[in-house]
Image: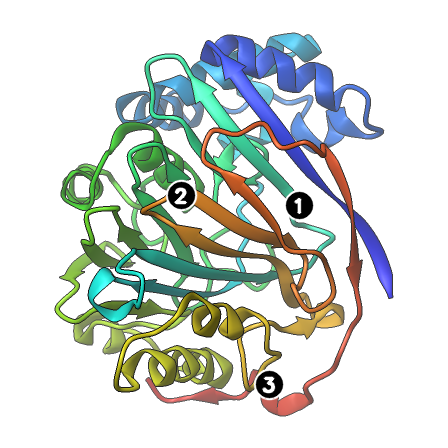
Amino acid sequence: MTTNIGQFAFLKGSSYEIGQHQAREFQKKPFAKSLFFTEKLTSDKAYFQMKAQIEQYCPSLNEELEGFAEGFGYKPEQLHFYQNAWLIPGGCSLGAILPGKMVDGKTYVIRNYDLSPAISDMRLCTTVVEGKYIHTGFSVSTFGRSEGLNEKGLCVAYASCGMPIGKYPGMRPSVVPGLQFMVIVRALLENCKNVEEAINMVNNIPVGTNMNLLIADANGAAALIGTYDGIKEVKRAELDYLIATNHGLFSSIQKMEPGKLEHSQLRYDILEGKFTESGKRSVEEIQELLLKEFPKGLSVHNYNESFGTVHSILFNLTDLQLEFSFGSPLQNQVNKIEVGENFAKTQIPVGFTNKSYGTEFWKIIKS
């Protein structure tokens, strides 16, 4: 077993103050400057273009980045974040379970995130920005978010769709200019109170990434937004659940995909099998999906091949609560936190025990 540290951060104040707070936090870490900054300035055109996009949809983030950069004595245009160098792909299993399908009549979202612990933030944040909705969720590249739940009961969770977009080897460049998922998720959590507001915002955002975005709210509404090379598709929940993994779920997107990983379809089938069973589900039945290992459940331990569970969450939108684990819940403690809460522990040891699933794990099948 290898170990890592899961972290919790309580971020409160103006956006600029939050940026400075995080600068003080990360100055204590070795290699922080090289992780966050480049000695070369981003070109004026690229920097101002990205800054302008963020300013339109998530202006508080620009202020946070400015405070962070100045806390280190750098210019904001020297941040890797603006150069989009830290886009992190991952395997995700998502499901929204609406009140009509639950014994307790509440709304839940299940979320399992698979990645390499070496490139995961392993950092849960409660963010209290002045003038924005309070939210709790995991960070990506420190300043972005991969999912979260806000004080109004809006839950947003991201899954990559097809081959990830980015600058790392194995990824492909974006076909259209636009914002990455980590900025979009954060913008929705800070500015939207329900599914319809979130759909409207995404429809007006330039999206540069290929993703399945699951959105649900405490009123029992849910929607799936698929984006792929400039295409945007929206599906509102017609049944008492919605599911997404890492392949195209709209016919227009499926026609563009060369294929999909078989394990993405298998994880989808696991969720669908549980949600389509007759009768209503208990919370314990939903939790079992996270507490069983693939291929019977959603937890994956393929860490040596950069595809293991780095965090797992059951969101309770009705009660504004998260039950989460750093790493696999089969190997680590499950914790509970309320949206907006300052978690008691700032650091939690996390264990990772690897398991190989063979070459078939990476089998590609037709979409």
The residue lying at 16 percent from left, 58 percent from top is: 234
Residue 139 makes an appearance in the image: yes
Decide: is 222 above or below 35.
Answer: below
Residue holding disc 3: 361
Label 2 with label 3: CB-CB less than 8 Å: no
Q: Position of residue 38 (x, y in %)?
A: 67, 26
Camera-side residue of 216 and 323 = 323
Callout 1, which amino acid? Met
The residue lying at 29 percent from left, 34 percent from top is: 152
Specify the label residue 173 is tagged with. Answer: none
Q: Nearer the viewer, mark 1 or mark 3?
A: 1
3D distance between C-alphas at marks 1 and 3: 24 Å
Q: Residues within 10 Å of mark 3 (few under 14, many from 20)?
A: few
Q: Work out whether mark 2 precedes mark 3 in sequence or the reverse, and give the earlier one.
A: 2
Callout 2, which amino acid? Gln
Res 358 quadrant in image: bottom right
Q: Work out whether mark 1 precedes mark 3 in sequence or the reverse, and give the earlier one.
A: 1
Label 2 with label 1: CB-CB less than 8 Å: no
Residue holding disc 2: 180
SS state under label 1:
loop
Q: Position of residue 57 (x, y in %)?
A: 28, 27
Decide: is 328 above or below 68.
Answer: below
